[in-house]
Structures are given as structure tokens and as C-alpha cells.
Image: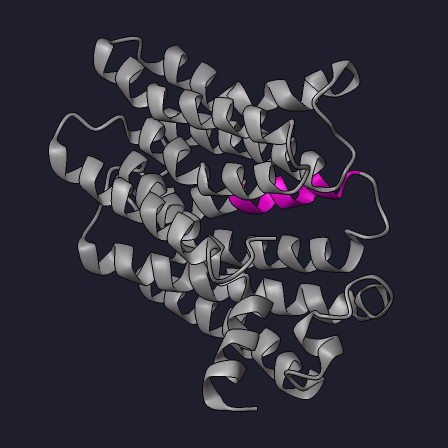
Amino acid sequence: MKAPGQLRAWLVLARASNLPTVWSNCIAGCWLGGWNSWATVLLLCTAGSLFYIGGMFLNDLCDVAFDRQYKPDRPIVAGAVTPRAVVAAAIVLPCAGLLLALAIKPNVLLWGAILVVVITAYDILHKRIAWAPLLMATCRFLLYLMAAAAGVLGLTPRALGFALALALYVVGLSYLARGESRVRRTSSFWLLLLFAPVAAGFYFDSTPVALLCALPLLLWIWRAFVLAKQSAGRPVSVLLAGIVLVDLLAISPTSLLPWLGFAALFGAALLFQRYVPAT
């Protein structure tokens, strides 16, 4: 393959359009953990990205038989990348991420190691168990805790609360993605989970600023509901980009710079989705 085509195959394999949500998780988690330094946050975002990409590579390796039957356009099955190269990357990237986590703090390494274990369990089991979305949500929960552990205060109550709220949000969108939820009465429970971050925001802070920070997420969830009436797949991508808005609500910034930063990450997630599928 030509270089651009080869690069795209790897980006599709990595589901790279979701990387801005990993970065926003790391920034928000560290913010809620008392912040640290920009160098630390850069290490966190890099480690989180390596864990995520390595997990996506392993995911496709575990799904080769399924993809051969139902998704023959996936990079490994289509022959765009070799299984041997993907296996090597799936091993090397998480190991490199753990080294970066160790360079930050021992506690960050601890949460990072647990995260890698859960990511691996999800990749191996997600086609075999109905509760796989809980494992996926646990991955985001642990990423938040890893980022918060890098802060000067560590695992604060707000960090734990929003880690749980994000996990519930991911459970809701994951069941929607698996086709086990639709916009109708039988799926109302899963759809209600999407509002868990809003409930957490109101629990920790009910000031006008916090209410303003909840507005983008509420409008985005409403947009996903509207799109769900037209297409079953599009709302999932919309809600994945909405993870950035969950993180914005988590930190509820009072200054303009964080708003601009999260707006840039949100825009990047939407832009990347135009070129690389999010699911």
C-alpha cells in the first residue's frame, strides 16, 4: 500500500478519532486531582493514548473471526496491515505507557497497570458476555483515577464522583452501540445513564457557572436523541465526542482558557470523525 493508505489503515485500526476524548479525560482527571504541571499532563495524555491505541489493536486481533464474517473491511481482515505488526504494537504500546506512568508517580503506575488488565479483559471477553459495556466503562473510570492520582491532591471526592459519572455515561452509550438499546420504553434505563454527569455536576456544585457548564452536554445529548430517530449508528459517534463535554462539566471552569481548550478538543473529535470512524 502507499504510505497515506497505510497510515489511514492504522488510524482506522486505532479508532484514532476518539483520542481527543482520552486527552480530555486525562486533563480533567488531573485537574480534579489538584493539577500538577503541564509536563505531567503531557505524559498522562501520551500514556493514556498508548493504552487506548494498544487496546484498540488488541480489540481487532480478538475480533478477526467476527470481522471476517461481518466486517471484512476492517484493516486486518482486509489485509491492509499484518497481524504480526499489530501483535507487536499491541504489546509494545501499553508497555511504553506503563513506563511513562512510572515516570510520573508510583500510584499512577498502579492505576495504569490495573487499566491495562481491564482493557485486555474487555478485548478478550466483549463478544462473549452481555455485560461487556461495564468493562468498557471501567476502563474510562480507571483512566480518570490514573489521571487524578497524578495531581497533587490525588483521588479527591469530585474526581471519584465524576469518574463514576463518566463510567455510567459510557455504559449508556455502549449499550446503544451494541444494539441492545434503542430510543423506546425498554431502553429508557440506558438512556437515563447518559445524564449521570449532569446529576454529578448538580451534586457537587449548583452555582450558575456549573449550570452553564452543563448546558453544552445537555444540548449534545438532545442532538443525539434527535439523530437516533434517523439512524442507529450516528448517535453513538455523537455521544463519544460528548465525552469531552462531560470533562468540561467535571472541571466547571470559571476562566476562558479552559473553555477554549475543551472547545478545541471537542472540535478535534468531530473533525477526526469525518476521516476516521469512531466505532
- Depth order, front residue of 246/8: 8
Determine whether 65 is above or below 144 in the image. below
Determine the residue positioned at 52% across, 20% down: 195
Q: Is residue 94 magenta?
A: no
- The magenta region covers 131-140
Q: Is residue 80 found left or right of 101 in the rendered image?
A: right
Residue occupying the far front of the picture: 230
State the predominant SS element of the stretch in magenta: helix
Q: How many marks?
A: 0
Q: Is residue 135 magenta?
A: yes
Q: Is residue 109 visible?
A: no
Residue occupying the far bottom of the picture: 2
Determine the residue positioned at 64% across, 83% down: 81
Q: Is residue 192 found left or right of 243 in the rendered image?
A: right
Residue 25, image x, y percentages: 40, 44
Residue 249, image x, y percentages: 34, 27
- Depth order, front residue of 24/70: 70
Q: Is residue 77 found left or right of 153 in the rendered image?
A: right
Indicate the colouring scheme: one colour
Determine whether 259 is above or below 94 in the image. above
For the N terminus, the quadrant is: bottom right
Determine whether 51 is above or below 156 in the image. below
Residue 176, image x, y percentages: 69, 35
- Depth order, front residue of 241/109: 241
Determine the residue positioned at 83% across, 70% down: 68
Q: Quadrant of residue 87?
A: bottom right
Q: Is residue 97 visible?
A: yes
Residue 223, image x, y percentages: 49, 27
